[in-house]
Amino acid sequence: MTLSLSRALAPLIRVNTVCPGYIDTPWFTKGRGEAQAKQVRDSVVAKVPLKVASSAEDIAQLVCFLATPASSNMTGEVVRMDAGMHLIT
C-alpha cells in the first residue's frame, strides 16, 4: 500500500510508513498487570540488539521528522523502528 500510494500521490503528497516494534506504554501494565508487563519488557530488552524498549516518544520523534522538510526527498519508504528486533533470526 505504501508503494502504491506513494506512486499515485506523488509529487504532491509523500507517503511513508513507520513500523514500530515493542513500545513500552502504560497499556501493557493496565492490560497485563505490573509483573507480567515488566516480564514482557525485560524479555524484549534482553533479545533486541540495541537492548532498549522503545517509547511512544521515540516513535513520535520519527513521525515528526517524516513531517518536516528534512524528509522532503523521502517517499515510499517503510521505516522500521524496533531496536533491531527484525535482525533476530
Image (spheres, rainbow, N blue to C red):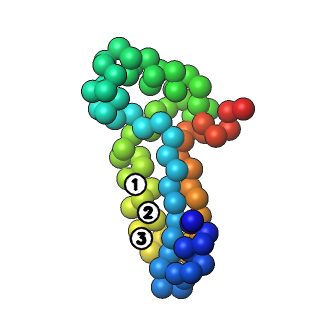
In the rendered structure, find residue 65 and report the number of the disc placed on it: 2
Q: Secondary structure at mark 1?
A: helix
Are dots 2 and 3 in contact, CB under 8 Å? Answer: yes
| Amino acid type assigned to the residue bearing label 1 in the image | Gln
Place residue 78 in its image quadrant: bottom right
Label 2 – label 3 distance at C-alpha: 5 Å
Q: Is residue 56 left or right of residue 82?
A: left
Label 2 – label 1 distance at C-alpha: 6 Å
Label 3 – label 1 distance at C-alpha: 11 Å
Residue at mark 3: 68
Number of numbered discs overlaid on the protein picture: 3
| Amino acid type assigned to the residue bearing label 2 in the image | Phe
Q: Residue placed at 55% from the left, 39% from the top? A: 83
Structural crowding at the residue carrying mark 2, measured as other residues with C-alpha within 10 Å and reported as few (<14), some (14–19) or many (≥20) = few
Q: Residue placed at 52% from the left, 27% from the top? A: 44
Are dots 3 and 1 in contact, CB under 8 Å? Answer: no
User: Which image quarter holds the C terminus?
Assistant: top right
Q: Residue placed at 29% from the left, 32% from the top? A: 26
Place residue 3 in its image quadrant: bottom right
Between 50 and 26, the one nearer to me in the picture: 26
Residue at mark 1: 61
**Placement of 39 over or under 79, stated as above or below:** above
Structural crowding at the residue carrying mark 3, measured as other residues with C-alpha within 10 Å and reported as few (<14), some (14–19) or many (≥20) = few
User: Which image quarter holds the N terminus?
Assistant: bottom right
